[in-house]
């Protein structure tokens, strides 16, 4: 816990100093990746079938590195504050990380998040959205001092770890908004997330009228 406090303090100071550049959220509506029968793990280590969880649901998907990352922790807290409003608009929040279930449990004991957090050990979901870049050897060394990083994929020299990112999915299964590097590179903007969600809800429900 003390290690986490230090990382959070250092990270937030760096964030405040950097300011962050504006990055557009919106993307042309497009089919989101499909995850038929892909089993992730909930904090108890039990199967969590993400494809079923996303089916015809308005969703904010949050990808984060792990509880050791101050930018990730801040993003999760911001989402915690927005959860009542998003839930009232029909959105579920689902957070995905390569961090092991027992570490997720430890984090949840301290943060009391009101939404689902699951383990994606192989970064299959983050990778499908293009949000699991390969770490440089220097990043792997630096992060590895504070974290239990996932194992590298076969043939790769370092692990893949998701950037703190958000994806907005509609009821029609399409991707409506996507932003990466939150807090670390781009300030978290709750009002903009709500605006993107409102647009996605309207557009996806219009499109969904033609779904069988």
Image (tube, rainbow, N blue to C red):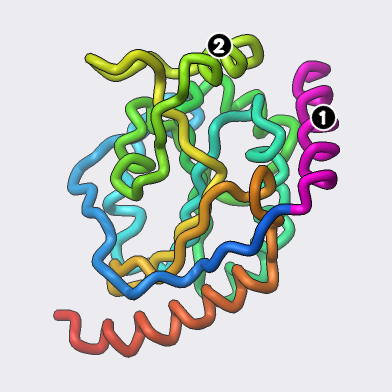
Does the segment drawn in magenta span residue 8? yes
Q: Secondary structure at mark 1?
A: helix
Q: What whole-number distance in Å separates the C-alpha atoms at marks 2 and 1?
A: 18 Å
How many residues crowd mark 2 within 10 Å: few (<14), some (14–19), many (20+)? few
Give me the residue at 73% from left, 58% from top.
81
114 to 91, vertically: above or below: above
How far across and down, in percent of the image, does residue 197 sit? Answer: 52, 74
Q: Which residue is mark 1?
A: 10
Quadrant in which the N terminus appears = top right
Magenta portion: prevailing SS class: helix
- Where does the image place residue 92, in percent across and percent down from the top left? 50, 61
The foreground one among 35 and 31 is 31
* Residue linked to disc 2: 141
For disc 1, the neighbor class at 10 Å (few under 14, some 14 to 19, many from 20) is: few
Please provide percent x and percent y for residue 24.
53, 68
The residue located at (29%, 17%) in the rendering is: 156
Q: Which residues are magenta?
A: 1-19
Q: Is residue 18 magenta?
A: yes
Q: Residue furthest left?
A: 212
- Where residue 65 sits: x, y (%)? 54, 32
- At 43% from the left and 86% from the top, the residue drawn is 202
């Amino acid at each position: 816990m003390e290690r986490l406090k230090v990382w959070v303090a250092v990270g937030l100071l760096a964030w405040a100093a950097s300011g962050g550049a504006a990055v557009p959220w919106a993307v042309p509506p497009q089919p989101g990746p499909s995850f038929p029968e892909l089993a992730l793990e909930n904090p108890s280590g039990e199967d969590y079938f993400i494809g079923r969880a996303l089916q015809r649901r308005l969703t904010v998907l949050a990808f984060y590195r792990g509880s050791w990352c101050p930018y990730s922790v801040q993003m999760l807290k911001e989402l915690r504050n927005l959860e009542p409003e998003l839930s009232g608009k029909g959105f579920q929040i689902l957070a995905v990380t390569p961090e092991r279930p027992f570490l997720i449990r430890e984090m949840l004991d301290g943060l009391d998040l009101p939404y689902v957090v699951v383990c994606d050990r192989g970064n299959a979901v983050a990778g499908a959205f293009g949000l699991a870049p390969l770490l440089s050897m220097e990043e792997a060394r630096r992060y590895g001092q504070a974290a239990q990083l996932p194992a590298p994929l076969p043939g790769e020299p370092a692990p893949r770890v998701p950037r703190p990112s958000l994806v907005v999915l509609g009821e029609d299964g399409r991707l409506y908004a996507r932003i990466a590097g939150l807090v670390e590179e781009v300030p978290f903007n709750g009002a903009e997330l709500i605006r993107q969600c409102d647009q996605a809800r309207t557009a996806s429900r219009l499109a969904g009228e033609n779904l069988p």
